[in-house]
Image (cartoon, coloured by chain):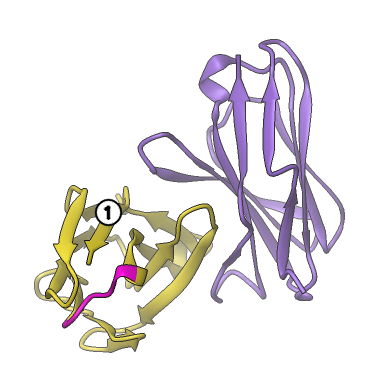
Chain colours: A purple, B yellow
Amino acid sequence: DTAVSQTPKYLVTQMGNDKSIKCEQNLGHDTMYWYKQDSKKFLKIMFSYNNKELIINETVPNRFSPKSPDKAHLNLHINSLELGDSAVYFCASSQDFSNEQFFGPGTRLTVL
Amino acid sequence: GNSVTQMEGPVTLSEEAFLTINCTYTATGYPSLFWYVQYPGEGLQLLLKATKADDKGSNKGFEATYRKETTSFHLEKGSVQVSDSAVYFCALRISNTGNQFYFGTGTSLTVIP
């Protein structure tokens, strides 16, 4: 069974569109994260949720909004997509903030 | 502030060569240190970790020692294999910042037969 899964794996879309990336973990973890990895492999945390509460909200544009319908899911919604949003987005989860993070396989977003 | 600096890649080695990937850090508190590995097309996986000074993390033949005096956590392996080809990320976690992770920029390793 996949511990942390993301859909879709690839997403190609036009500038200005709104899109969502879904993330699910079946590990029973309390904390989930979203990371952005740019073309140079630089990895930056965007958000984290602990028990449905936003804990860390880095200085990302407010076009990005995390949505957690329950503890096992943390979806990423992006409004008005821009060229610079093209990247690989990784979801991760951990039992709590002090434990190892388990990463999903990533979603490669390409904005044309 | 808190940050991680890794050696620039890409690194290309022949099979069975010795590997060192340098990592140094700056931290305002007492960090835990990690190495993550990202195989092609996959997410990051924890490779090893060390939670206090002088601890040595080890896994799959890789080792790294937490050196507080030099603020370093260099990754080493005595004999690399083609299957070790991946991107390696050094990271730190600071407990007094909500346990936020800070990742290095990643070092790409290619091992050739």
Label 1: chain? B
Q: Is residue B88 left or right of residue B112?
A: right
Range of the magenta residues? B78-82
| Residue A88 seen from this side | yes
User: Residue A23, image x and y in percent?
Assistant: 76, 52
- Does dot 1 land on a helix, a strand or a loop? strand
Res A62 → quadrant: top right
* Number of numbered tags placed on the structure image: 1
User: Residue B41, image x and y in percent?
Assistant: 52, 52
| B57 shown above or below B80 | below
The residue indicated by pointer 1 is B107
State the residue in front, B87 or A23: B87
Res B85 → quadrant: bottom left
User: Residue B7, image x and y in percent?
Assistant: 17, 53
| A62 shown above or below B64 | above
Q: Is residue A56 left or right of residue B104?
A: right
- Point 61% across, 49% down: residue: A106
Res A73 → quadrant: bottom right
- Point 61% across, 19% down: residue: A111
State the residue in front, B59 or B92: B59
Q: Is B80 one of the magenta-colored residues?
A: yes
State the residue in front, A68 or B36: B36
Q: Can you say which quadrant of the picture contains the C terminus of chain B?
A: bottom left
Q: Is residue A8 left or right of residue A56?
A: right
- Point 73% across, 58% down: residue: A5
State the residue in front, A49 or A76: A76
- Point 78% across, 34% down: residue: A20
Provide the major secondary structure of the magenta segment: loop
- Neighbor class of circle 1 (other Cα within 10 Å; few <14, some 14-19, many 20+) is many
What amino acid type should be assigned to the residue bearing mark 1? Thr
